[in-house]
Amino acid sequence: MNLEEMKRKYAYTLARVGLNVQKGQPVLVEACVEGAAFTPVFAEECYKLGASNVIVHYLDEANMKVAAKYRSAEDVKAVEDWEVLQNQKYLDEGACYVRLEGVNPALMADVPEDQANAVFAHVDAVRNIMRKASREKHCQWLIAMIPTQEWADWILPDIPAESRLEELWKLLLKLCYIDEENDVVKTWEEKKQRKAERGNKIDSYHFTKLHYTASNGTDLTIELTPDSKFGGFRGGAIPFSPNIPTEEICTTPEKFGTEGVVYATRPLLLGGKAIENFGFRFEKGKVVEVIAGEGKQMLEALVQMDENSGYLGECALVEYHSPISMSNRVYYTTLIDENASCHLALGRGLSSVQPKDSRYTFNDAVIHIDFMIGTEDMHITGTTEDGREVVIFDQGDFAI
C-alpha cells in the first residue's frame, strides 16, 4: 500500500462523499493543529472539486489548556467577536464546513475539571456558529478524523512506537471503507442505501417508544413522536454524508418522554478529558441524577449548560457486532466510538422541525453530546401504536 496515495484518497472521500463540495463554494475547515500535514492535502482535493476558497482555522487545545490555567473560566469560555466574524463571513457566502479532529486523551489528564470544562465550553460555543448555519442555511457539514501521533500512541500501545501512526492510518481507512481498488463514491452510495432501507423498516412499525435493557443496569424507556424517523439522513438540496465513518441509524425522540437509568459503555472525551464509568437517571425526560466518580463535576456542568441540556436530542441504533466494534479498539473519539455502539445524545435534537402535533416536542439546546450505551447483551423492545411489543435488538444486534 502506498500510504501517501491512500491519504489522498481519504481526503477525496471527505471532500466528495462527505461534504460534496460544489463548484464556486467556499469550504470552512476546523482542523486539529497536530494534523496540519494532512490539511493541505484535503484542501487541494476541495479545490479540485471547484471550491472557491478553503479557509483553515486550527484548533490548538494544548495552548487552550495553558490559557485555562491562568485565565478565569468565564474568560476562557467567552467567544470573541473575531471568532464569530471569521466563521460567519464565509457561512454567509454559502460555505460548507468540516471538522478534522485529532485525539489526545492524555492532554487534560492533569487539569482540574473546571478548567477542562471551560475549554470544552469555548470550543463547543464556536462550533455552534457552524451548527446554526447547518440548521438555518442547510449547508453541508462533515466531521472526520486526522490520525495523529498522540492518538496512535494512546490506542495502539501494543504496536511498536515507530509503526503506530501508520497503523492508525490503515485502521481508519478500513473503518471508512476505503481501499486501493474501490470506487468510494459507489461504495458509500450503496452503504447509504442499505442504512436507509433498515431505517425505513424500523419506521414501518410506527413505534411510540423504545425500551432498552442490559445486564449492566440499563433500564430506560424513550418515547418517540410520529415524526421520529430512522429512515435516512435528511439534509438540504445538496446531498452529503455528515459523518465519516458512520454505521448508525438515528432519530430525535420526544423531549419529555425518557424515563429510567442508562449506563455508558465507552469513554466520553470532554474538553480533552476522558470520562469513564458513568450513567444518568432520567425522569420526565430530564437528567435528575449523574452517576459517576471521576468526571462527575464535568458531567453535571454539561447537563446544566442551559435549561435543555439535560434532555435527550438523539437516540441511535448500532449493532454491537459492527465493523468498528469488532476492531476491538476503544478510539476515545465520539465520532468513531458512537459507531461501535447504540448511543444517545444529550441536548439539541437532530431535527429543528417541531412535530406538527403540538403534543410532541423536540429538544433544542446549546449542546449535542453523544454517549455510548450499547452492550453485547443489549435488548431493545419497541411498542407500536396499537400496543404490540416488537423485539428490535437482541443480544446486541438487530432482530428485525
Image: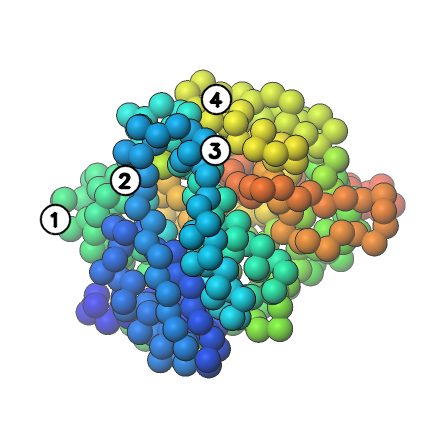
Q: Which residue is mark 2?
A: 62
Residue 241 visible in the shown view: no
Q: CA distance from mark 4 to mark 3?
A: 16 Å
Tag 2–tag 4 contact (CB < 8 Å)? no
Tag 2–tag 3 contact (CB < 8 Å)? no
Q: Which residue is mark 4?
A: 296
Q: Which residue is mark 3?
A: 265
Q: CA distance from mark 1 to mark 2?
A: 23 Å
Q: Nearer the viewer, mark 2 or mark 3?
A: 2
Q: Amino acid at mark 3?
A: Thr
Q: Nearer the viewer, mark 4 or mark 3?
A: 4
- Labels 4 and 3: the sequence-earlier one: 3
Picture coordinates of residue 5 (x, y %)?
Answer: 24, 71
Residue 120 located left or right of residue 61: right
Picture coordinates of residue 356 (x, y %)?
Answer: 83, 54
Q: Residue at x 41, y 76 (%)?
A: 51
The quarter holding residue 194 reads bottom right
Q: Residue at x 32, y 42 (%)?
A: 61
Q: Residues within 10 Å of mark 3 (few under 14, many from 20)?
A: many
